[in-house]
Amino acid sequence: MTTQHEPRKILVAVAWPYASGSRHLGHLAGAYLPADVFARYHRAAGNDVLMVSGSDVHGTPITVRAEAEGVSPEEIVERYHAEILENWKDLGFSWDLYTTTGTETHKRVVQEFFLTLLDKGYLYKKTTEQFFDEEQQRFLPDRYVEGTCPHCGYEHARGDQCDNCGRTLDAHELIAPRSKLSGSRPVLRETEHYYWKLSAFQEPLLEWLRTREGWRPHVINFALGMVEEGLHDRAFTRDLDWGIPVPVDDLGPGKVIYVWWEAVMGYYSAPQEWAERRGTPDAWKEWWMNPAAESYYFVGKDNIPFHAVYWPALLMGHGGLDLPTDVPANQYLTFGGEKGSASRGVGRSISWYLERVEPDALRYAVASVFPETHDTDLSDAEIVRRVNEELVATWGNLVNRVVSMTHRYFGGAVPEAATDDVDEALLAEVDRTLVEAGELIEAVKLRGALQRLMVGAQAVNQYLNEREPWRTATSDMGRTGTTLAVALGAIAGLAAGLAPYLPFTSREVLEGMGLEVPPQGPRWGRPALAVGATVAEPKPLFSKLEALEREVG
């Protein structure tokens, strides 16, 4: 008798993209596709998953773009949020809620968070100097200032962070700063803001980080190094009109909560919005105020400081909320050696690829090179190679040839099976494949899990080559039927395992064998096929790709 385990509560928290431009494959590989694979697996394993994210509508890249185009920030947000939503829909992402930081719920939660920190003495007022553009007669938010990074010498560092070395910065640290609005050198002027006592969390963060187990080395090492260097208090408000207003009026007009802190609070506000929409306003607490709950933050490595240091510190300051279980930040997907960048036009958009590559094929190509431990380069030629030589040749052809033979020899019905040790060995190999792939996904080794599943598909191909059902069909239909029944069962198990990666075609395969697939996807495991069940007519699962450099259609 098997023991029934309570479903685990799994919060899948996914980086909030700026609604300031098209998302590219670097974004897809860094945070979004890994999160969807992970969430789909845990649902298949019977766990209670809450997968949330949304478009960051207050980031300064939005106002920078709006000013460059001479339109309002709202117009930029509306344009790119709609495009991002369409990308997620086309890719089959299984969000429980994909929202924006522009909702009333988010505003309320962020302002309440601010007041809690203020009440606990973690926020204080301070007059400091901030860059001011004399030509434009305005204070410059950090992203409106560029210059040379004082740490690595990169000449295009922003006033909040250097994309080259990943360090967070204050704008006044930049060498040779310049205004993105006018190109002139800004001057420093006094301004009053709330500051966050980040320094108070130095020791609690060190103690917590040193107890983390299973975190990726580049994540834990970066976070520990950053905290051990010493944490300094950071500005919590900014001179801007675009953002969430400070909920106290002692700073005067034109002050908003700094988007750095406001955006990460979306992981806390989105579950509350999800619960409100369902009519169960307290349901979110099962993922946020439950010591047994688990939370996984899917981000790119440039977001490690925010999710492995700043966000845990904010949660400690607030109190009563669960800290991250893991921050499986991916490294960069590069294109010709360059990191993808929406602002610099490096890396084609997700939309561009979706016009030329089927969704599951694109998901496969990207998942097969997830940059989990090191930067990984991906070219269009490599996408074509992986789709054609791996996905089509190994998996698509396997399904097609077995289904075709089932129709040719058994009228499209699942045959009876009288298995021997070789047959059982293959089914055991598929079951072992699912166990091992599941363990890898649990450890957020998603690339390795996909490779393991494809090894399972190769084992079925090898089994067919050894059993030769096309040859035994001339002399022993019983043997042929067993071979095809076993192959169909193996394919059904692998389709269930591949479903987190290939949700569209896996459903097609399983339903084509007469199996019922729940809306959230198949259960994890090898399903039993009914003898005599009708198998759908054979058709290619995937189209072979031509070179992507040429226009298609």
Image: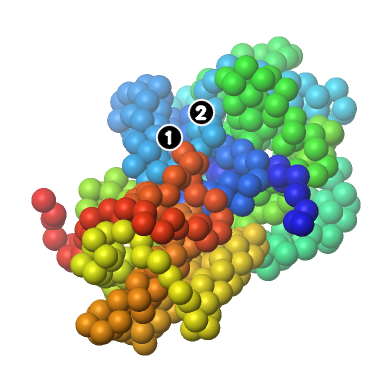
Q: Are marks 2 and 1 in contact (CB under 8 Å)?
A: yes
Q: Residue at x 56, y 44 (%)?
A: 14
User: Is 413 positioned to the left or the right of 294 in the image?
Assistant: left
Label located before the other in sequence (2 or 1): 1
Task: Give the Cα separation between the discs numbered 2 and 1.
Answer: 9 Å
| 522, 350: nearer the viewer | 522
Q: Is residue 210 visible?
A: yes
Which element carries disc 1, helix, strand or loop? loop
- Local crowd size for mark 2, using a 10 Å CA cut-off: few (<14), some (14–19), many (≥20): many
Q: Pick the residue in front: 412 or 538.
A: 412
- The answer to whether residue 128 is visible is no
Q: Amino acid at mark 1?
A: Ala
Q: Nearer the viewer, residue 271 or 413?
A: 413
Tag 2: residue type?
Thr
- Residue 98 against residue 450 in the figure, above or below: above
Can you identify the residue that label 1 sits on?
A: 19
